[in-house]
Amino acid sequence: MLTEKENFMRMLRGEIPEFLPRYDMFGWCAMFSPFERKKNADGYEVDEFGMEHTTNASSMGGMMPVPGRILVRDITKWRDVIKTPDLSNLDWAQIAEKEMAKKDPVNNPVIVFAGDFFMKIMNFMSFSEGLCALQEEPEEVYALLDWLCEYYLKLLDKKITYLKPDILSLADDVAAAQQPFISVDMYRRLILPHHKRLADFALDRGLTLIMHCCGKCESFIDDWLDMGVSGWEPAQVSNDLKGIKKKYGSRLAIMGGWDNTGPISYPDTPDDVLLAALKEYVDTFAPGGRFAYMAMVMSENDDPDSVRKVKLSEDFYQNYARLWYKNNA
């Protein structure tokens, strides 16, 4: 029996896996943050760039910029505001040991993330001002992203040295639910060159490349593949996923493809409706390989019905989805 890692990497190579893999982003991701966020006087966590962050139940624990707290108000003056974080006196071995204590690198792949260039501009400036900067001051945006890329390359070098990861995930949400935030041309001019620098760095060191991008982002797939991307998640259903699987075949793994925001994922969905949807989901994307299960049910930890639905989905994976290739040989 292959380990989860061996089986998952086989799927990413375009081979038929021994069992249908499940993508465990949170379990496999090594965050490896060199700076512990400390709270300021207002109670907000501050990152290494000076951005203030907060969270709430609707963001499912994800840290977001504090509304109204703008770090860069004028893109032409970003050099006066953002300073390069000091990486010179950090105990990288200790940071890595702390992070890897929570991982099982023998049996599970280790994934590191980098590349949130579009999102950093939005976080630094707010969405409205960030989008205006992309259109009105592309040279300054490019200069800021070039500086950020240099910083990310230094971090990635440390991650590869100390964590020995299997996969780099380029994570940048350049699309909304129904359309991209920016054109393909703008992506190619301002974002792609920096994604490619990180991609080349990782591929040259033997890592496999995947892309995390939410929303309707299918128009960027060709550029991702040209960079060497092997898999894409969460592959949300606003994209033509059946057409994408047919078009790209074994060139691109769909790691997701489940309607994680629609009513099928609500806790009050009837059991039989959920199970039928899960079966259709697996039967649609499993043939031919290059698919990783990533179905989930929205849940509240203290809601018994939500907990039961999560258990139902887990049992379905173990009893049907995981065995799909064995039962359909």
Image: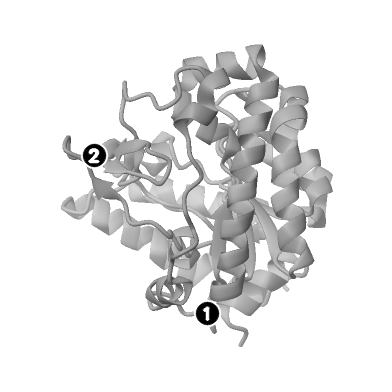
Residue under label 1: 105
Which numbered circle lies on residue 44?
2
Q: Is residue 283 left or right of residue 88?
A: right
Helix, strand or loop at disc 1? Answer: loop
Q: Is residue 303 left or right of residue 19?
A: left
**Image quarter of residue 262:** top left
Q: Residue at x 38, y 56 (%)?
A: 35
Amino acid carrying label 1: it is: Pro
Please provide percent x and percent y for residue 175. Answer: 59, 29
Answer whether residue 21 is visible to the viewer in this image: no
Which numbered circle lies on residue 243?
none
Q: Nearer the viewer, residue 270 or 125?
A: 125
Q: Residues within 10 Å of mark 2 (few under 14, many from 20)?
A: some
* Closer to viewer: mark 1 or mark 2: 2
| Up/down of 261 relative to 111, above or below | above
**Image quarter of residue 101:** bottom left
